[in-house]
Image: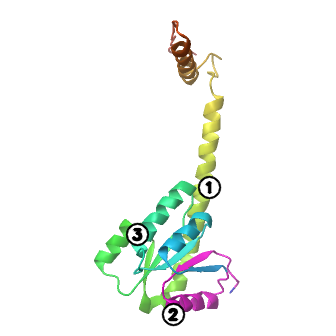
Amino acid sequence: MPISDTSILIVSESEAGSFLLKKILREANYSCVTHCSGAVEALQYLENNPTRVLISEWDMEEIDGIEMASHLRAIERDQHRFTYTILIVADHSGEELNAALQANVDSLVGTSDLPSHLIPQIRTAERISNQINDLLIRNHQLEEQQQELEVGQLLDPLTRLGNHRQAEQSLADTIRQIDSRGGAVCFILINIGNYQ
């Protein structure tokens, strides 16, 4: 199996837990693995280091895995990126599953299932994370292009007269000037209907 350069962050307060996760990942040829010993440290790391997959314990002292996932989603919204989040739980009941879904956790893996279920989950996480991040990048580029086009479109292409946006901008500028210097302004709006 080829070596994978997918960035993975392990968040575990337990040395034994982090050792086991690193061992499983190393055996599956994952080379870009980082470890944080708590949720606060992990969130600080994630603010500046985009990561494709986050593997975290559910129960931690500072902030639990659910709350960390919620904070992570807020960071991602601001930075237009996505991290697939896997929480490790002792047992996952229906209540825990609902809480995880509410916090936008992507997957739960039981501690007893780690050796057999973790790697398939990470493979799935890689595909989903790559696709979503590609879409977020494309969406951001389209939004920037749309803004550029809107700024450049102040004239109606058919009549070559100022359009509605240009009229609003000119009126706002004129009103600001009149407010600061005094005076009056007249405004005429002409609507050409059914023009061909």
Q: Pointer 1: what residue?
A: 137
Figure quadrant of the N terminus: bottom right
Q: Quadrant of residue 24?
A: bottom right
Q: Secondary structure at mark 2?
A: helix
Label 3, label 2: how far apart the Cα atoms are: 23 Å
Q: Pointer 2: what residue?
A: 16
Above or below residue 177? Residue 20 is below
Q: Of the residues shown, which amino acid type is indicated by label 1?
A: Ile
Residue 102: x %, y % from top left: 36, 66
Q: Mark 2–mark 1 contact, CB under 8 Å?
A: no
Is 134 in the magenta? no
Q: Of the residues shown, which amino acid type is indicated by label 3?
A: Glu
Q: Residue at x 48, y 79 (%)?
A: 56
Work out which residue is located at the far left of the displayed protein and give it. Answer: 95
Q: Residue at x 48, y 76 (%)?
A: 86
Q: Residue at x 61, y 21 (%)?
A: 156
